[in-house]
Image: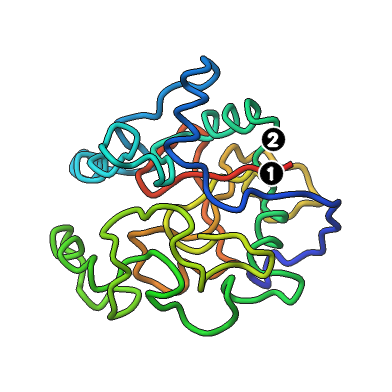
Amino acid sequence: MGAWDSYEVRLEAFELDETEVTVGYYRECVKAGHCAEPHTTVDWGLAGESARAFWRQFCNYARPNREAHPVNCVDWYQAGAYCNWAGKRLPTEAEWEYAARGSHGLRYPWGNSPPTAEHMNACGHECMPLLVARGTFPDDAMYEASDAHVDTAPVGMYPGGRSPFGAYDMAGNVDEWTSTRFCRNPKVPCFDETRVVKGGSWPDGSKSGVWMGERRNNLPGSRGSSLGFRCAR
């Protein structure tokens, strides 16, 4: 978090999923009748029609051979429903960040060194054609090497990027929903309906986007091909 909103938080003991929730695990919840199928469209903020048409192709649930990939294109309500079915809940922002960077406040889960293709799934060399297709400058890639996945990767593929507590993909792959409202000061009433999103994702080409202190926010009904979740208890 930036200096403008730094504050101390005391956490009770908690557990966090080792990986992001996969398509395969989410499908079990759908079969049980507790979860709605993920969307096959994306929708967030000021996303225009062309952006929605482009990014929806990366929604994983209906794509073949994606059972081990993170489920995406789910809104905050769907993420919460899955965690409830699994006997868990969405993590708070503070829990998520502590699990990602440890008690020493690391910049990234693996330490303070810059991201590489050995650490995470972001937008590296393999992503360059995608950047060009979207009209983004090629030097927006996270690193020059290839992380071997143009969009999402199966969870747990990057052991070099594990957090101090052994959690995979806290940086990259998909951004993750938390239960926390996007408020700047926890000591005053907050009526902001948006929820904090953490972690960075596969299209990210900026190192600041995968810094563990970075905060993003989305309305609970938002959904994207770069947005998923994991659960806590």
Q: Disc 2 marks which amino acid?
A: Lys
The C terminus - image quarter: top right
Q: Is mark 1 on a helix, strand or loop?
A: loop
**Residue 17 place in picture, x, y as percent:** 63, 48
Rendered position, 167 above or below 67:
below
Q: Disc 1 marks which amino acid?
A: Ala
Q: Residue at coordinates 73% horizontally, 67% vertically from top-left?
A: 6
44 or 123, which lies in front? 123
Rendered position, 72 above or below 146:
above
Q: Is 153 left or right of 7, judged from the image as shown? A: left
**Residue 81 place in picture, x, y as percent:** 58, 27
**Residue 219 place in picture, x, y as percent:** 50, 38
12 or 49, which lies in front? 12
Mark 2 lies on residue: 88
Q: Residue at coordinates 52% horizontally, 55% vertically from top-left?
A: 216
Contact between labelled residues 1 and 2, with CB atoms less than 8 Å apart:
yes
Mark 1 lies on residue: 232
Q: How far apart are marks 2 and 1 (CA)?
A: 6 Å
Q: Residue at coordinates 20% horizontally, 39% vertically from top-left?
A: 53
The N terminus - image quarter: bottom right
Q: Residue at coordinates 39% horizontally, 64% vertically from top-left?
A: 121
